[in-house]
């Protein structure tokens, strides 16, 4: 049994996934999944390709896959059961991660809104001898309040991320 912090587990998963991606093409390669050789009438065999131990590579790939699954499961369990005190609430790590994701998406959308909604006042005349009017586009919200809200959300995101990182370095998971 191996004991790791959540952060160490995530680092190990990244390393295992890198190894998995490196080995996978060898296992699914059609050329390596078959053997080509010349068989003479007297029974002599001459291999045309370099020897590739398919079963060994497949077993190693399956072992890596199983290890990734075990570590990810342990991390998921810890994320769902470990509580942290942040933003005046006691929530799970996963709950904090969900909030970070949602707040980031909201910040992105609100920043886009502020940048892309333009106010204007355009003088118009429909036809000769008609009165002049203005086509006005105004914000349907207070720009300063929106900027303050974005800053507040960014501050909350930072606080959540710091709390998540701290607990990820303090919480241990057991890998069987």
Image (tube, rainbow, N blue to C red):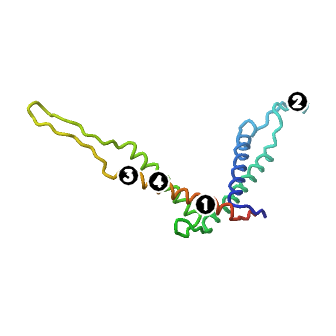
Q: Is residue 77 left or right of residue 47?
A: left
Image depth: mark 3 or mark 2 in front: 3
Name the residue: 70% across, 55% down: 68
101 above or below 91? Answer: above
Name the residue: 38% across, 54% down: 145
Image depth: mark 3 or mark 1 in front: 3
Could you tell which of marks 1 and 4 lies nearer the N-terminus?
Answer: 4
Judged from the image, the secondary structure of the residue bearing numbered disc 3 is helix
Which residue matches tag 4? 151
Q: Residue 61: image x %, image y %? A: 74, 49
- The answer for how far apart the CA atoms under marks 1 and 4 are is 20 Å
Q: Residue 17: image x %, image y %? A: 69, 49
Q: Which mark is residue 144?
A: 3
Image depth: mark 1 or mark 4 in front: 4
- The answer for how far apart the CA atoms under marks 3 and 4 are is 11 Å
- The answer for how far apart the CA atoms under marks 2 and 4 are is 81 Å
Q: Residue 9: image x %, image y %? A: 70, 57
Name the residue: 30% across, 51% down: 140
- The answer for how far apart the CA atoms under marks 3 and 2 are is 88 Å
Q: Are marks 1 and 4 in contact (CB under 8 Å)?
A: no
């Amino acid at each position: 049994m191996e004991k790791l912090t959540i952060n160490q587990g995530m680092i190990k998963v990244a390393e295992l996934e890198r190894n998995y991606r490196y080995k996978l093409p060898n296992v699914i390669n059609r050329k390596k999944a078959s053997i080509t050789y010349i068989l003479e009438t007297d029974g002599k065999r001459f291999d045309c390709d370099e020897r590739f131990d398919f079963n060994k590579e497949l077993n190693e790939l399956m072992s890596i896959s199983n290890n990734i699954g075990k570590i990810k499961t342990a991390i998921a369990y810890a994320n769902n059961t470990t509580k942290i005190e942040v933003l005046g609430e006691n929530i799970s790590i996963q709950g904090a991660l969900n909030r970070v994701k949602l707040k980031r998406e909201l910040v992105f959308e609100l920043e886009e809104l502020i940048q892309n909604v333009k106010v204007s006042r355009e003088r118009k005349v429909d036809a000769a001898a008609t009165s002049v009017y203005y086509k006005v586009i105004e914000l349907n919200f207070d720009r300063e309040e929106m900027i303050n809200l974005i800053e507040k959300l960014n501050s909350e995101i930072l606080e959540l991320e710091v709390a998540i990182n701290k607990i990820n370095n303090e919480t241990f998971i057991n890998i069987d």
